[in-house]
Amino acid sequence: MAKYIFVSNDGSGKSHAVAEVRNRLVHFGSTDSIALRRGLDLPRSIAAANDAGCETVIAAGGDGTVNAVVNAMMDIDAAHRPKLAIIPLGTANDFAGTLAIPDELDLAVELVSTGQYIPMDVVRISASRFERYYANIAAGGNSVRVSEALTDELKATWGAFCYMRGAIGVLADMRSFAVHADCDGEIIEVDSWGVLVANGKTNAGRILVAPQASPADGLIDVIIIREGSVLDMAEIIAKTLLTSFLECDQVIFRQVRKLSLTSTPTMRFTLDGEVIDQEPVHFEVVPGAIQTVVGAEFERPIQVAQQSDSSEIVGVRISKEIQ
């Protein structure tokens, strides 16, 4: 019986380290391995390992690998779902950063057996004939065009900064979307450049776009970027680099349990690197879905008293609203 199942991606940014990491893991217990490849039925493979007594799934790769593993694990009944550990072997490793998992591989591997595991939220995204889950951030609008512009050569040359480099060509031709958003019953209608629906804090190479987000608060952070001028975009970029992104007048920010969104034209999204062609309509947080390892510096959400008004969010509130 394997204690761990090790899921790796040979196309990840640090794939050369896969063998080294796998060899270190054997000191903690029996480990089986799965290499992501075309045609692999990952949900079936993880379910089989879970039925055989596997305790922890280790996602060794970037955000795309984590995304694939999370979706496979959500197919397993919550009462019998294994734990999740992440070894950051990707280009950006945004979600690993939110969880405060060290970039140093020896420290990340040590966390698998010695670290604390907490109930981690995931986000369910669905439309009429579509349902997926993600752990970090869904980015819609012009950001999809940036993702599509990224080549393997650009990633290899620029590393995490490839996302900023890829945005240069998009800035000159920003598209606008007429957005209708239902945020836990509050209707927002606005012309928008893009929408972020965040469970984690960073996107596109550790860029802090959702500083108040936490995958342990039972909420999703909704960030809607209003249409504006080139100067407005310059301000957004500058404040993003200065970590004061949410203070921009161009940004509408809410923390909610559910979001329904439609737009004209249709706004496509990327889910941790996976491009979704069908317009997502509904986002909903699944609180505490997977027990996931975190680092010592993981930022826990601030607990507040329960509100008497049932329309208010209960249990956790860490945001201020920006109109």
Image: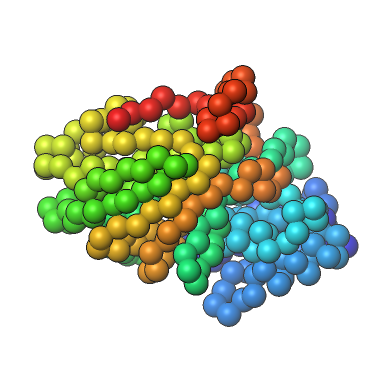
Along the line of sight, the residue nearer the viewer: 36 or 305:
305
Along the line of sight, the residue nearer the viewer: 278 or 186:
186
Residue extending furthest right?
1
Quarter of the image with the N terminus is: bottom right
Give the residue drawn at x 48%, y 69%.
128
| 91 with respect to 299 (left or right) | left
| 307 with respect to 292 (left or right) | left
| 230 with respect to 260 (left or right) | left
Which picture quadrant has residue 170?
bottom left
Which picture quadrant has residue 71?
bottom right
Q: Position of residue 285 (x, y in %)?
A: 56, 47
Residue extending furthest top?
305
Q: Position of residue 255 (x, y in %)?
A: 46, 36
Q: Position of residue 159 (x, y in %)?
A: 37, 51
Give the residue drawn at x 54%, y 77%.
38
Residue extending furthest bottom?
39
Which picture quadrant has residue 263?
bottom left
Quarter of the image with the C terminus is: top left
State how the image is colored.
rainbow
| 239 with respect to 65 (left or right) | left
Give the residue drawn at x 85%, y 65%.
52
Vertical side of 3 occupied by 97: above or below:
above
